[in-house]
Structures are given as structure tokens and as C-alpha cells.
Amino acid sequence: MKTIHIYLFGLGNVGSTLIDQILESQQFFKKAQKIDLKIIGLSNSRNVLMRNAGIGKDWKEVFAQQSVAREPDSFYKFSEGDLTTKIAVDATASKELSQFYPELVENGFHVVTANKIANTLSQSFYNKLRSVLKEKELSFEYETNVGAGLPIVETVKNLHKSGEQLFAINGVFSGSLGYIFNRFSQEDISFSQVVIDAFKKGYTEPDPREDLSGNDVARKLLVLARETGLKLEFDDIEIENLVIPELRTASLNQFIDQIKKLDSSLELQKSQLQPDEVLRHLGQLDVLNKTLKVSLQAVNKESPAGQLQGSDGFFEIYSESYAAHPLVIKGAGAGKAVTARGLLSDIIKVSKTRSKVLTV
């Protein structure tokens, strides 16, 4: 039986759902795959809870009652001397935390993350992280960086590693914006109301402006671009920002209070649609010309992107083998359940492929 110790950062929508999924599946993994998953550490932005025996279904109450103030090295001190496989799971959108990934690896943690920021910081940071991972022989899994639970990153990575020349990757990269523009294009509803609905359902980033600014899609494009071998920076991406300038630097509460200010410009674009058109938020990666673009476009209702429903994501991959007819991956591209399940899948991947595991 392989014992895996999980240290989780982030107890919001995705983190809480991941905890529930792990607890519900513990017996399955023990029986079917001989893996004993134990959540040893929990952390939000202020407090931590650490338990040698692992947390149970009463974790919320226990965390509220027994957690202590978080220190930068809380998990390091607790895990010191622990020879069991340790996985740090990042279910946050924190730039600060992502900058500490090399330090986590230096302290013996594999890293599984839904947080896209580490993979889209400077190329020098990107290279440094992978150098430390190689030196320590530890894993870094981030399938949920693009497409939530859809296998986009692994597909692109495997094509590139096999020597396949990739030409382009296009599609609806954001399930959040897919949901927003599916509804906005088809319903008699204000843009601001659709965004609020998506925010409340947990489809958007914790701050919806990360989606509306185009930054979230841009990060996904950059993640994939770097998987194809391109050495590009975030500033190289052409991004259409849907947030008006006066709301870009406002607090989150101020933005939510004033979000109706976005309605007029989006309503104008909607009014200019032809009867057979809908609005779609698209990401476009031209590998050959090394260009990345994020924009809102009118597309035909019968096109693959135009036919999307709900929060589905849609990706077309053009390469040597898929030149005339692209490889298409489509499915739920947002939501706490699919993202958490993607994280759990990455946890199991690390658990099954690493040799440095304590067998008991």
C-alpha cells in the first residue's frame, strides 16, 4: 500500500470540492489501486491545520476550531523527516504562492496545481522551476491549467514530445466565458447579470476580471505555447480586455457594485450580430508564426465554436498528422467539480508514477 500525504493550499470552491472527492474515494483507491491518500495539511491565506492521521469529513469544524496562524514554513516544519511521498496541491489563484513552487520542491514536495501563474511567469522562472524538479526528481502536474478536467495539456505535450510539428491551437479556452457568451448571445439578459450568475456558480476566477480582461485565456495560451517549445513571455500576447479602464484597478467589491457599466459596449456588439451569428471569446495560438491572440469575435451559429452550450470548452489542434482535419477536444471547461476531479487525477498520476514512495 502506497501512502500519499497531501498538503492543500486553498479551501475555496475547488479546494473544498477536492477534499470531498478525496474523502469519498479513499476506500476505492485503497482497494483498486493500493494507494492510501491522506490529507495531512490544510491552509488558507491566514491559517493552517496539520494532522498526522489525516483530516476527516468534519474538517471544516476542526479547521475552524484548531487551525493556527499560518507561517511561511508551517508545512516544511511539520513534514520535516517525513519520508512518505508528499504532494503540495495549489487550489488557489495566488501569484505569491506560485512563486514559492521551487522552494516547495526543494523541501521535497511534488506539486499539483490548478494555478496557471507559475507556468506563465518569466521564461527564466519557468526554466528554474523545471531545473529544480529535475535535480530533486520530483513531479509537477498541471493538467487543470487549461480546460479544467479536459486532457489538453497532456495531449499537446505528448504530440510535441513525439516529434509532431504543431501548427496552431484555436478555440474557446475559457469555460467561464463560454458560459457567459452562450447565454448573452441567446437570451434577453444583460451582460452584467450573466457575469454575476457565472460568478455565483463558481464558473469564473475568484475575481471575474481575470476572465473578462482576457488574462486567464492568455495564460492558458502561454501554457500551451511553452509546451510546444516556444519561448515567449506574457507581454507577447495580443489581448482584448473587456473591462473598461475605470474598473480595472477598482477593488473586487467596487467592480461588482459597478459591473453594469460594462453593459453598453457589449450590448452594442450583440446588436451588430447577424441572425446566424453568436459572440464567442476565442484564443488563437499560431505556433509557426509565434503569435498568440485573445479576442471576442462573432462566429456562425453552425460553426464548432458557435454550437457550444453551457460552460463547454472547445479546442482545435492542427499539426502534421491533423492538418486537414484538426484534433478536437470538447467538454466541460469550467466548474469546481471538474477542476477538482482534474486535480485528483493529477494526484493519482504522481502517486502511481513516482518510485520514492513509502510502502507500508
Image (cartoon, grey):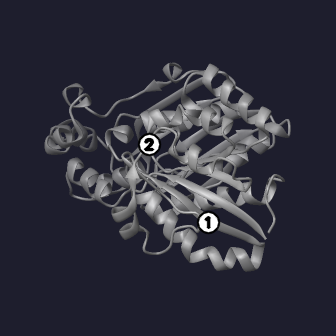
Residue 159 placement: quadrant: top right
Which label is found at residue 178? none
| Residue 258 sits above or below residue 351 on the image | above
Closer-to-camera residue (315/200): 200
Q: Can you see residue 326?
A: no
Of callouts 1 and 2, which one flags the residue occurring earlier in the amino acid sequence?
Answer: 1
Q: Which residue is mark 1?
A: 38
Circle 2 Cα neighbour tier, 10 Å, few/some/many (<14 / 14–19 / ≥20): some
Closer-to-camera residue (174/48): 48
Where does residue 252 sit, x and y in percent of width and height? 23, 40
| Residue 331 sits above or below residue 318 on the image | below
Where does residue 227 sit, x and y in percent of width and height? 69, 35
Which label is found at residue 93? 2
Q: Is residue 97 left or right of residue 323?
A: left
Point 69% across, 70% down: residue: 36
Residue 106 placement: quadrant: top right
